[in-house]
């Protein structure tokens, strides 16, 4: 079976599961013939998070993307409930303690786009990491969008659109 590599602009309200519990599956966005070739998500996005999702039937590729030790950086745009202060930015860059995690989580890069909007790049990908990091500095994520995983970028895809890509 040929190896398949797909990038999807995951829309709001979809689950990254073949057996969704509360929302429609991202796999409903693909032809059945494609899904039947063993298509799996390389990582996940919450139902309320939009943006870049990589999918493949290549288990080694999926493992490489998902494994924390491989260190794929992930870039998100977060719309926040409150303005992101300089103090909050310093804490996020230095590292914040998250309940249940062994070591602090820090932003690899953090750019203020607007008063309530930030682009944040992280490594790892623990449960709700970006949302929890902003909560740890006293803010709340209203909307979250992933634009990049490592060197793979979302590009011009619109919500629900997908395209094939070649691996680096």
Image (tube, grey):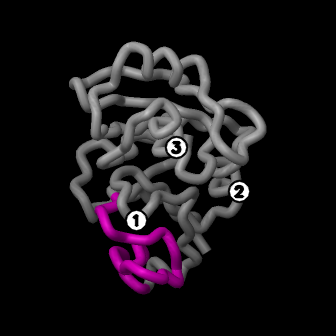
Q: Quadrant of residue 24?
A: bottom left
Residue 9 higher or lower than 16, as above or below: above
In the picture of the structure, the residue carrying the numbered disc 3 is 132
Q: Which quadrant of the rendered structure holds the C terminus?
A: top right
Pointer 3 with pointer 1, Cβ within 8 A: no
User: Which mark sits nearer the N-terminus, 3 or 2?
Assistant: 2
Give coordinates of residue 10: x percent, y percent. Answer: 35, 60
Q: CA distance from mark 3 to mark 2?
A: 29 Å
State the residue at coordinates (63%, 62%): 58
Q: Which residues are magenta?
A: 10-32
Would residue 85 be visible to someone looking at this image?
yes
In the picture of the structure, the residue carrying the numbered disc 1 is 47
Residue 10 higher or lower than 168, as above or below: below
Give coordinates of residue 50: x percent, y percent. Answer: 34, 55
* Secondary structure state at the residue bearing disc 1: loop
Residue 51 left/right relative to 138: left
Q: Which quadrant of the rendered structure holds the N terminus?
A: bottom right
In the picture of the structure, the residue carrying the numbered disc 2 is 60
User: Which mark sits nearer the N-terminus, 3 or 1?
Assistant: 1
State the residue at coordinates (48%, 22%): 109
Give coordinates of residue 87: x percent, y percent. Answer: 43, 15
**Neighbours of disc 3 within 10 Å: few (<14), some (14-19), many (20+):** many
Q: Nearer the viewer, residue 99 or 93?
A: 99
Q: CA distance from mark 3 to mark 1?
A: 16 Å
> Which residue is outermost to the front?
138
């Amino acid at each position: 079976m040929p190896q398949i590599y797909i990038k999807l602009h995951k829309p709001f309200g979809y689950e990254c599961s073949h057996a969704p519990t509360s929302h429609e599956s991202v796999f409903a966005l693909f032809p059945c013939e494609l899904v039947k070739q063993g298509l799996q998500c390389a990582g996940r996005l919450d139902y309320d998070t939009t943006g870049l999702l990589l999918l493949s039937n290549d288990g080694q590729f999926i493992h490489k993307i998902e494994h924390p030790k491989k260190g794929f950086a992930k870039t998100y745009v977060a719309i926040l409930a409150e303005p992101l202060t300089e103090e909050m930015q310093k804490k996020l860059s230095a590292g914040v303690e998250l309940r249940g995690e062994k070591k602090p989580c820090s932003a690899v890069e953090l750019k203020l786009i607007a008063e309530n909007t930030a682009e944040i790049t992280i490594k790892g990908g623990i449960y709700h990491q970006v949302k929890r990091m902003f909560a740890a500095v006293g803010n709340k994520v209203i909307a979250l969008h992933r634009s990049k995983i490592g060197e793979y970028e979302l590009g011009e895809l619109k919500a629900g659109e997908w395209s094939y890509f070649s691996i680096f």
